[in-house]
Amino acid sequence: MKWSLPSWQIGHALGIPIRIHASWFLVFLLVSWTLSTGYLPENLPGLSPARYWVMGGAAAVLLFLSVLLHELGHSYVALRYHIPIDRITLFIFGGVAHMRKEAPSPQAEFLIAVAGPAVSFALGAVCFSLGMLAEFMQEARGPHGLLLLSALLGIVNVQLGLFNLIPGFPLDGGRVLRAGLWAWGKDFHRATKQAAGVGLGFGALLGFLGLSILAGVLVGELPDSMASDGSWIIFIGMFLFAAALASRRHASLRQALASVPVRDLMVRTVESIPPNCTLDEAVSRYFQPYGYGGFPVLENGRLTGLVTVYDMQTVPVSLWPWRQIGQVMRPVSPSLIVAPDASIMDAMEQMAREGWDRLVVMQGNQVVGLVTHSSILHFLQLRQAPTR
Ligand SMILES: [Zn+2]
């Protein structure tokens, strides 16, 4: 998902940075406004507008905490499975914990997915208990603000848990479904595509439901107050549909990348540079005539490192006649080497992990090719080209 609006970091929880996306403020205003002009004056009459706004704002903050705790539920279990989490972002449709890698097993996937709704249901139970306590203590004085607030939060948390259990990927219920399909068919990417297909179905279904509600309001079958519910359901349905579509495309792509070996994509005509070559010579004899962004460095047929234009740029041009390639290259290490039978997916993950833009392909002790980030991108562009 790409959101062009900015987001701000507001703190840490479980060691994870918590960010608020600009679109979340829209929800905050919407919730505060709905509560302070509708729900609260109707159920708790006789207070000043300022009181209603303060209470509405407080409820919106508590709603925010509910969503955050739901995401922390997922995060807590993910961390137990050693999955690093970059950040938690709260945005217009709730929250998302950005996990750096996929769950290691169907069981892990299942437990991470159900942890969020489990937290929401537990919070719902706590809120209802508090509400009952407030009711018990305030019985003589009629409805009370605390009672209203806790009942509202209880309902919201239970709804949050239930909505997320809709079995369409990428919702939590869809992740549970994927875990089941993954365990059953033993194919992670196929399970993702199938669960995302169900997500598309539920997205369309929600859109249709929302439209039916709006139509009911228009012809007078349903009260006017349901118009906002209908719009909101259409909005959520569209979001789920778009997210499921993106997930399905992503899974197809990963499936394609996992099935193609590095050997099919590597540059085979590998020219190498000796380590005692000066940077000046390297530019005139290798970089300019061949036009490659990097070369393996070989001494007596043995790989000693890799040199790229980025490494050359770290040295001022005036020093190029005196500096040797061996002094600026990245020395050979296992992170720089990939086998020709490895998948493109493995190669991409290795590059991302190590921060390289190319890997040396080696069969035994021999350099057989180079695989670069840009050659993989070209391959992907060709695969995504429209069929005429
Ligand atoms: Zn969730």
Image: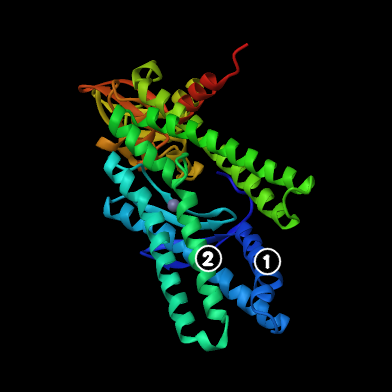
How crowded pointer 1 is (Cα within 10 Å; few <14, some 14-19, many 20+) is rated as few
What x and y, as percent, mark residue 188? 35, 32
Side of 128 where 107 appears, left or right: left
Is the shortest distance between ligand 1 and the CB of mark 1 under 8 Å? Answer: no
Residue carrying label 1: 34
In three-dimensional space, the C-alpha distance between marks 1 and 2, rounded to whole angstroms, equals 15 Å
Point out which mark residue 185 bears. Answer: none
Task: Decide which of 215, 258 is in the foreground and name it.
Answer: 215
Name the residue type under label 2.
Phe
Q: Is residue 41 left or right of residue 87?
A: right
Above or below: residue 145 compared with residue 292: below
Foreground mark, 1 or 2? Answer: 1
Query: Which residue is at 57% across, 72% downward?
Result: 59
Q: Residue furthest top?
A: 388
Amino acid on which the number 1 mark rests in the picture: Thr
Q: Residue at x 50, y 50 (%)?
A: 163
Instruction: State whether residue 170 is above or below residue 143.
Output: above
Q: Secondary structure at mark 1?
A: helix
Q: Is residue 323 visible?
A: no
Please provide percent x and percent y for residue 265. 41, 19
Quarter of the figure with residue 75: bottom left
**Above or below, 228 relative to 239:** below
Q: Which residue is mark 2?
A: 64
Q: Earlier in the sequence, mark 1 or mark 2?
A: 1
